Amino acid sequence: MHARDLARPCTPVRIDACFQEAVRLLIHERVPALVVVSADGHPLTAVPPATVLSAALPRPVRDDPLLAAVVGEALDETVRARADSLLLADVLPQRPPAPAVVSPDASPLHMAAVMERTGSPVVLVVDYNDDQPHLLGTVDATTLLQHYF
């Protein structure tokens, strides 16, 4: 069994996409990570949904979660409005963590080791034909667990 056999197709999102587009993709596909690519399709990072959600929260709530308990739903519209005004690039760190990339021939053990070393929620299975990236999909920890157990 190789990475190409375990990869689940995914829809990458360009770094210059609007934040709402990224959120809609996460909601629709229910993936363990948002795969962010450059304008020319090169993988840049894989972002867990919790990180995307956090980016939409007002700074005071991120700094003090107890504030959210006090205000309740009063800031829900603020979260929605903030999300409407952002680009994905606005919410990613200046230097996002490099994606965990493996070749289509990678073994499950190799993928598990890469995930453990990088702390990434997924590995991206990328085939570089003609120096162009072809994202075949992602493999998450649950898929690797299913392979072994």
Image: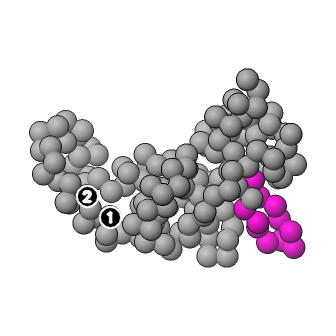
Does the CB distance between marks 1 and 2 fall below 8 Å?
yes
Q: Is residue 134 magenta?
A: yes
Residue 19: tell me if it is visible: no
Q: Is residue 59 above or below residue 63?
A: below
Image position, residue 18 (x, y; %): 43, 71
Amino acid type of the residue tagged 2 in the rendering: Val
Residue 120 rendering spot, x and y as whole percentages: 61, 43
Q: Which residue is mark 1?
A: 83
| Residue 93: x %, y % from top left | 47, 57
Q: Residues within 10 Å of mark 2 (few under 14, many from 20)?
A: some
**Residue in the picture at 75% in, 53% down:** 125
Q: Any mark on residue 79, and which?
A: 2
Quadrant location, the N terminus:
top right
Comparing 22 with 118, the one in front is 22
Answer yes or no: is residue 59 visible.
yes
- Residue at 15% x, 43% y is 72
| Predominant SS of the magenta segment | strand
Q: Residue at x 83, y 71 (%)?
A: 131
Amino acid bearing label 1 = Ala
| Residue range of the region highlighted in magenta in the rendering | 125-135
Q: Is residue 121 above or below residue 145?
A: below
